[in-house]
Image (cartoon, rainbow, N blue to C red):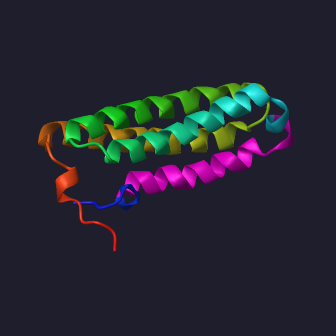
Amino acid sequence: MAKKVDEFPVYARVSELAVAITAILNRPGMRRDLKLRAQISDAIDSVAANMEEGFEQGTDRAFAHYLTIAKGSVGEIIGHLRRASRKGYIQAEELSGLVARLEEIGRMLGGFIKYLERSDFKDRGRHRIPDP
């Protein structure tokens, strides 16, 4: 059983993608489009934040609920990046690579959600080993 959320492979993928998306957000065109930039930034932050918050919940079903919210934010990011591409901030090849990575994260989250809902462990917190 994982003791920290960053032990999950999907969390590592989200973290890596956040770095790539942040680099895009720092481009001159994106920096001028404050609303779109903020929406993308908030959505990528939401994925990680919901995974972190969900991990601290007492049951697998509650954790799955937060992962479902994170998965929704993945879809939101895809939509925002497509709008950024239509505005000329992201090239088509780069967009397709980002969308592929986001879709993979979405599939990973979906599988994880199904697993948690099936296992439905009820007392996740009691079995955690405290950090030294």
Q: Is residue 132 magenta?
A: no
Q: Quadrant of the C terminus?
A: bottom left
Q: Does 79 sit left or right of 36 as displayed?
A: left
**Residue 99 seen by the camera:** no
**Residue 51 seen by the camera:** yes
Q: Residue at x 44, y 29 (%)?
A: 72
Q: Does 5 sit left or right of 29 as displayed?
A: left
Q: Is residue 67 above or below residue 9?
A: above
Q: Does 95 sit left or right of 90 as displayed?
A: left
Query: Could you tell me what secondary structure mostly forms the magenta stretch?
Result: helix
Q: Residue at x 20, y 50 (%)?
A: 124
Q: Position of residue 43 (x, y in %)?
A: 57, 34
Q: Is residue 10 above or below residue 1?
A: above
Q: Does 17 sit left or right of 122 as displayed?
A: right
Where is residue 21, by image quadrant? top right
Range drawn in magenta: 8-29
Where is residue 29, by image quadrant? top right
Q: Position of residue 50 (x, y in %)?
A: 43, 39
Q: Position of residue 101 (x, y in %)?
A: 51, 45
Q: Residue at x 56, y 50 (%)?
A: 17
Q: Is residue 103 above or below residue 83?
A: below
Where is residue 64, by image quadrant? top left
Foreground residue among 4 and 85: 4
